[in-house]
C-alpha cells in the first residue's frame, strides 16, 4: 500500500487523510509510541480516547478479544482506534484475525500495528501488513546520527535552533536513549526561551553530568589529522565512560565516510541516502568533504587497518583499551610527516617511550 517516512506520515495526518490500517516497523519504543500518539490524536480529535481507543500487546492478546475490539463501532469519536503493540507476539489465530481486518477495511475503524520484525523473518504475516497497510519504518538513528537527530527535532518539534556542538555534547552526555534525549531537549527549550537558540553554554548550564570531551569532536580531530590533540584528550574521553572498542568502531565508520568523500560530495550523499542516514547527517557532508583533503586513499586504508589491529588486541587481552588505542593513533599520526615530531612528544609523556 506504500511506505512513508515519519515526516510524510505526519503530513498526511495534518492534511486530514485519515482512516485505514497502519503498520509501524521499529525496534525503538520511543519512536513507536510517538508515532502511535500522532495517529491516535489525529483520529480521535474532537472525540474521546476513553470510549474509542483500545490498546493491547500482541503477546497477551487472544483472537477472540482482538476480533471483539475490531468489531466495536465508534461511540463519541469519528473513528474507533485499535492499537496493537508488539504485534510480532500475536498467535497464529490472532494473526489471521489481523490479516482479515486489513484485507477488508471498515469505515470509521483504524487499526495500528507496531512490531519489531525479527531479523531475517520470512513470515507471510509481515508481507501482508506491508501490502495492505500504510507502512512506516521507524529507523532509530545510529550513534553518529544522534547530534543531527537532536538538531532536526529541535527545529521541527520546538522551533528552536540547537547548535551542533551543543547537540554533540548533549548526545554524548545522554547516549542513545531517544526518550531521555527528547525530554532533556524539551527542558532546554524552556530554559532558553525566548532566545530560540541553544548553544554549549545553555547545555552546560541546564544539563548535569556532561563529559569534558564529546566523542564526535574527538573523532573530528582524528579525521582532521590533529592526532596530538586527540591523544591529549583520549584519557578524559575514556575516563568519562567511553569504550575504546566503541570509539574504534565509530572512528572507522567516520573514516570510511571520509574515504567516500574523496570521490566527491555526490558519491557520499548517494551512500548516506541508501543506508537511511542522510536525513540526520546532511549537515555533516561538507565536513567529511573537507576532512577528505587531509587523507590519501592509502592513508585511509592504513588507518582502518591500524584500528582493526587495535580492536583485535583489546579483545584478545593483548593490550589495555587505552594503550591499544593510543598505539593506533600514534601509528596513524606517523603517516603524517608534519605531525610526526609533535605526536611522538605526546606519546612519550609519562616517562614511557613508544616506537612507531
Image (cartoon, rainbow, N blue to C red):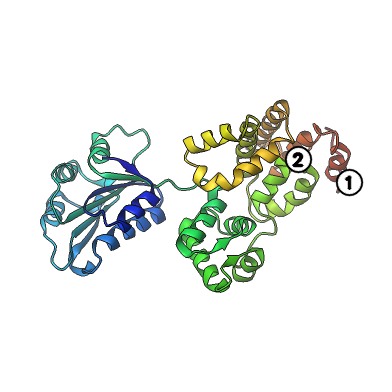
What is the number of the mark on residue 76?
none
Q: How crowded is mark 2: few (under 14 residues within 10 Å), some or many (20 or more)?
A: many
Quarter of the image where one finds residue 314:
top right
For this rendering, which residue is in front, 172 or 322?
A: 172
Against 239, is 190 above or below? below
Q: Residues within 10 Å of mark 1 (few under 14, many from 20)?
A: few
For this rendering, which residue is in front, 270 or 50?
A: 270
The picture places residue 67, in percent across and down from the top left corner, at 12, 51
Residue, far top: 298
Reading the image, the residue beneath label 1 is 351
Against 28, is 52 above or below? below
**Mark 2–mark 1 distance (CA, rounded to whole Å):** 25 Å
Q: Residue at x 20, y 44 (%)?
A: 91
The quarter of the rendered structure image containing the C terminus is top right
Q: Is residue 34 visible?
A: yes
The picture places residue 96, in percent across and down from the top left corner, at 16, 41
Element marked by disc 1:
loop
The picture places residue 133, in percent across and down from the top left corner, at 25, 44
Please state which of the two labelled residues, at mark 2 or mark 1, is closer to the viewer.
2
Is 144 placed left or right of 349 in the picture?
left
The quarter of the rendered structure image containing the N terminus is top left
Against 190, is 220 above or below? above
What is the number of the mark on residue 225?
2
Amino acid at each position: 500500500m506504500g511506505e512513508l517516512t515519519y515526516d510524510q506520515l505526519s503530513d498526511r495526518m495534518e492534511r486530514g487523510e485519515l482512516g485505514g490500517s497502519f503498520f509501524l516497523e521499529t525496534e525503538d519504543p520511543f519512536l513507536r509510541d510517538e508515532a502511535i500518539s500522532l495517529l491516535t490524536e489525529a483520529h480521535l480529535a474532537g472525540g474521546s480516547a476513553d470510549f474509542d481507543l483500545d490498546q493491547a500487546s500482541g503477546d497477551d492478546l487472544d483472537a477472540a478479544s482482538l476480533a471483539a475490539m475490531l468489531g466495536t463501532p465508534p461511540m463519541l469519536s469519528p473513528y474507533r482506534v485499535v492499537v496493537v503493540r508488539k504485534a510480532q507476539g500475536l498467535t497464529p489465530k490472532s494473526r489471521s484475525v489481523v490479516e482479515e481486518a486489513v484485507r477488508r477495511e471498515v469505515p470509521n475503524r483504524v487499526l495500528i500495528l507496531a512490531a519489531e520484525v525479527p531479523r531475517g523473518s520470512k513470515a507471510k504475516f509481515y508481507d501482508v501488513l506491508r501490502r495492505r497497510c500504510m507502512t512506516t519504518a521507524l529507523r532509530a538513528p545510529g550513534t553518529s546520527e544522534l547530534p543531527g537527530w537532536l538538531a532536526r527535532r529541535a527545529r521541527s518539534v520546538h522551533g528552536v535552533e540547537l547548535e551542533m556542538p551543543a547537540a554533540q555534547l548533549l548526545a554524548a552526555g545522554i547516549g542513545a536513549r531517544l526518550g531521555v534525549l527528547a525530554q532533556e531537549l524539551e527542558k532546554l527549550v524552556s530554559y532558553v526561551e525566548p532566545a530560540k537558540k541553544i548553544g554549549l553554554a545553555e547545555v552546560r548550564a541546564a544539563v548535569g553530568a556532561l563529559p569534558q570531551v564529546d566523542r564526535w569532536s574527538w573523532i573530528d580531530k582524528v579525521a582532521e589529522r590533529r592526532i596530538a590533540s586527540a591523544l591529549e584528550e583520549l584519557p578524559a574521553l575514556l575516563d568519562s565512560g567511553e569504550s575504546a572498542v566503541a570509539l574504534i568502531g565509530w572512528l572507522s565508520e567516520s573514516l570510511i565516510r571520509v574515504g567516500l568523500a574523496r570521490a566527491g560530495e555526490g558519491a557520499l550523499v548517494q551512500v548516506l541516502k541508501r543506508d537511511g542516514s542522510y536525513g540526520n547527517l546532511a549537515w555533516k557532508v561538507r565536513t567529511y568533504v573537507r576532512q577528505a583533503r587531509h587523507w590519501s586513499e592509502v592513508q585511509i586504508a592504513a588507518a582502518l587497518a591500524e584500528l582493526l589491529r587495535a580492536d583485535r588486541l583489546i579483545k584478545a587481552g593483548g593490550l589495555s583499551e587505552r594503550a591499544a588505542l593510543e598505539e593506533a593513533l600514534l601509528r596513524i599520526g606517523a603517516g603524517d610527516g608534519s605531525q610526526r615530531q609533535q605526536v611522538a612528544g605526546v606519546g612519550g609523556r609519562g616517562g614511557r617511550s613508544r616506537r612507531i
